[in-house]
Amino acid sequence: MPGSGKDEFVKVAREMGFIDAHMGNTVKQNALKHNIDMDDKSIGAYATEERKKYGMDIWAKRTAEFISNPDITVVDGLRNEEELDYFRNNFQNIFVIAVFANESDRLERILNREREDDGHDYSGMHQRDTRELSWGIGKVISLADFMIVNDSTLEEYHKNVRMLLSHIIERHPEINPKNSGR
């Protein structure tokens, strides 16, 4: 969910040599091409309309175009089971990692990061949560291979992310970014 710590997860993954692909950036890049305002409501409405027009997996398909080394790519922002199915049907070594944080921690982080596309109060966060839940994010979270809880300090969370990614690499050496030659 928004504010749970996905960007911080990706930051640690990048430090470990992974590449990242943000589905939200794909949405924003496409929205800019269509002169969509960059506020949360406009971006959310655009993402929803594109899903209605082109299928629930449209953002996975568009994001996949930017993935050059899938074995070491962390995709941030999966929102529904259709997107997950698209990635599982087109790539190997797919692991879903859900990042959980409670509502009050998420709200505090959202207010502190001051992103244009975030809600600016509890109501805005709740509206975004409701929209994303309507897309099916809850189902993706329930299907996760791993869940990491982000309920302590940033340093502790980073340590836990490193441990989880190291655990995955240890069991699946084919995805080790240090062996990728990038």
Image: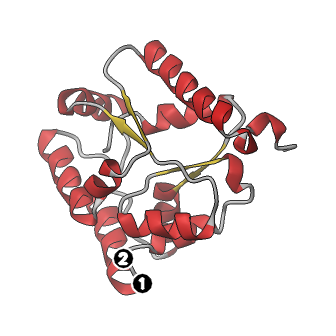
Residue at image location 33% in from the left, 37% down from the top = 3
Residue 150, located in which quarter of the rendered image? top left
Judged from this view, the residue extending furthest toward the left is 123
List the single residue furthest toward the front. Answer: 171
**Residue 152: image x %, image y %?**
34, 15
**Residue 25: image location, x then y, percent:** 51, 56
Task: Work out whether 11 lies above or below 163.
Answer: below
Label 2 element class: helix
Q: CA distance from mark 1 to mark 2?
A: 5 Å
Viewer-nearest residue: 67 or 94: 94
Residue at the (36%, 52%) spot, across then down:
143
Report the quarter where the C terminus lies.
Answer: top right
Q: Is residue 125 above or below residue 46?
A: above
Provide residue 7's location: percent of width, then percent of height: 48, 37
Asked which quadrant contains residue 35, the reply is bottom left
Q: Quadrant of residue 44?
A: bottom left
The disc labelled 1 sits on which kind of residue?
Tyr
Query: Looking at the image, which residue is at 52% across and 73% down?
Result: 33
Q: Residues within 10 Å of mark 1 (few under 14, many from 20)?
A: few
Closer to us: 17 or 122:
17
State the mark number for residue 89: none
Within-10-Å neighbours for mark 2: few <14, some 14–19, many 20+ = some
Residue 100: x, y in percent?
A: 32, 35
In the image, is 1 to the left or to the right of 21?
Answer: left
Whether residues under marks 1 and 2 lie with C-beta atoms below 8 angstroms apart, the answer is yes
Instruction: Point out the image quarter for the N terminus.
Output: top left
Indicate the secondary structure of the residue bearing disc 1: helix
> How are the residues colored?
secondary structure
Whether residue 110 is situated above or below residue 22 in the rendered picture: above
Name the residue type under label 2: Arg
Look at mark 2 in the image and give the residue it sits on: 51
Image disc number at residue 54:
1
